[in-house]
Amino acid sequence: MQGYRIWECLVCGWVYDELKGAPEDGIPPKTRWEDVPDDWLCPECGVGKSDFEMIEVHTQPSSTAASTATQSDSPETQAAAESNAELAAFANIDYARKPIIVIGTGLAGYQLAKELRKHDTSTHLIMITADDGNSYSKPQLSTAFQKRRSPEQLVSYSAREMAETLQANILTFSKVSAIDTDAHTVTIDTGRQQSHLTYNKLVLALGSEPIHAPVAGNAAGCAFHINDLQDFQRFYTAASGAKSALVIGGGLIGCEYANDLVQSGFEVHVVEPQSQVLANLLPPDASALVQTTLSQAGVNFHLGTTVKSLDYRGSGVQAELDNGAHIQVDRVISAIGVRPRVELAQQCGIPCNRGVLTDRLLATQVEDVYALGDCAEVDGHNLCYVAPLLASAQALARTLAGTPTPVFYDSMPVNVKTTLCPVITSPPPRGTQGDWHYTRADSQGVAARFITPNGELMGFALAGNACQQVTEFSEQAPPIMQN
Ligand code: FAD
């Protein structure tokens, strides 16, 4: 019998595992991909089956010694095991050549490794991560409560399984603290000891980090910033028994958490300094539809104001807003944005702007060092979404395998997972002159195009049931990069 296969959403990275099925969508375990209904949509981002790709991974890993410590080990044990152990050997790998080292095992790092193995099965690949190396789809962090998924259930594969699948050595709980670009070495810090590894090519897939809101008060440090699975684990634990939450920030992540928590029974407050939600992504009427729909579900919006201070009061926290209002809640989430992680690159002399600067080959300005994902600014574009990193991973894998391949960012609409009022948007580049033109704005849906004074279409926005028009709007949308 053919082994069970895994299909991956090319837009958001969500994986369909035939062995597990998608029980939340009524698809039982062991359902073959061919038997999944044709009108089934990705539970994460809403794209259809045609946007999935089969990845050549079988769900039952063999018992060959992989190169990570077991998941049940404590972080300290794992770190010690990693730093002490010789890197495990895989039969196909050519150890005579220096390795490709990838720093980061988020979607960018793992996607690159998967793509690389399609073209090159023999280069020694070492992946280094500061976290546990578990493979998961980050977009699922903001829909997990309503889907009743625990942090453990969000893990698709352990680092050990990934190591075996990718025929790679994966060093977990290992922070890269320095890069010597002349000597081609990285310094790894496990907290107990330092070690050095030499690379032939180095890839930075370092992600981004949350921006902290400047808030006063004795509970200023209590806000949860949920930017990875560990963050989510901490919030998940703290949310147990909590009944109310304040979300600081009414952008994409803030609205997604408001949508998620309100449907899970929380009393939710959102504080947003601008006068509309999703202000950087949507025209006013589309924002208004999202706001109205979420308000009807119970979300309390406080727009045009900021959180001045957070102070412990009773068993929870009291927020004082700039407009003088007070809100008492059990937990606080801060979601005011992320910034690319560039410190390591900056310290090592790799030029950065907002992100690590690369050309369209994903090459930095330092020889043999590449970057992709949230940390990279590719030909002037720092886009902290999944679609750009998937395109980057495909191109960079070919380049690393010997065929220089520039990346091309086509139109890449963003799905906002406010499931009560879905949104698909392709906003114009920042600073573009022009206006939103509505083709529809009613209580069920809003559709608009952003047109420049020269009549050029530069973006679009769909909200509510107008999202059904996505194919028509996407086809007309301009690419992000010019060919
Ligand atoms: P990360 O996943 O952050 O990975 C960074 C890696 O680098 C980690 O392994 C970390 O340990 C490692 N690292 C960093 N520094 C070091 C160091 N010095 N040494 C060793 N390791 C290091 N995008 C969409 O397109 N659609 C969505 O619906 C969507 N929803 C989202 C929902 C949430 C809640 C969040 C937070 C983001 C969402 N995004 C979405 C954005 C998307 O998830 C990110 O763009 C993407 O996951 C970034 O992947 P990455 O690999 O670049 O970074």
Image: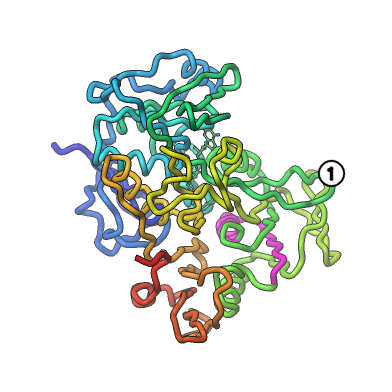
Residue lying furthest left: 1
Q: Is residue 412 above or below residue 73?
A: below
The residue that appears at 24% across and 62% down in the rendered structure is 38
Residue 266: within the magenta? Answer: yes
Secondary element type, mark 1 = loop
The residue that appears at 56% across and 79% down in the rendered structure is 433
Q: Read off the residue under disc 1.
A: 218
Residue 140, can we see it?
Answer: no
Tell me: is circle 1 under 8 Å from ligand 1: no
Residue 193, can we see it?
Answer: yes
Q: Which amino acid lies under the numbered mark 1 shown in the image of this protein?
A: Asn
The residue that appears at 46% across and 41% down in the rendered structure is 106
Q: Is residue 106 left or right of residue 318?
A: left
Please name whichever residue, 291 or 160, is drawn nearer the observer in this view of the structure. Answer: 160
Q: Which residues are magenta?
A: 255-274
Q: Quadrant of the C terminus?
A: bottom left
x and y, in percent, of residue 73 in the image: 49, 20
x and y, in percent, of residue 411 in the image: 39, 67
x and y, in percent, of residue 41 in the image: 34, 60
Q: Is residue 345 left or right of residue 211?
A: left
Q: Quadrant of the N terminus?
A: top left
Q: Is residue 300 above or below residue 285?
A: above
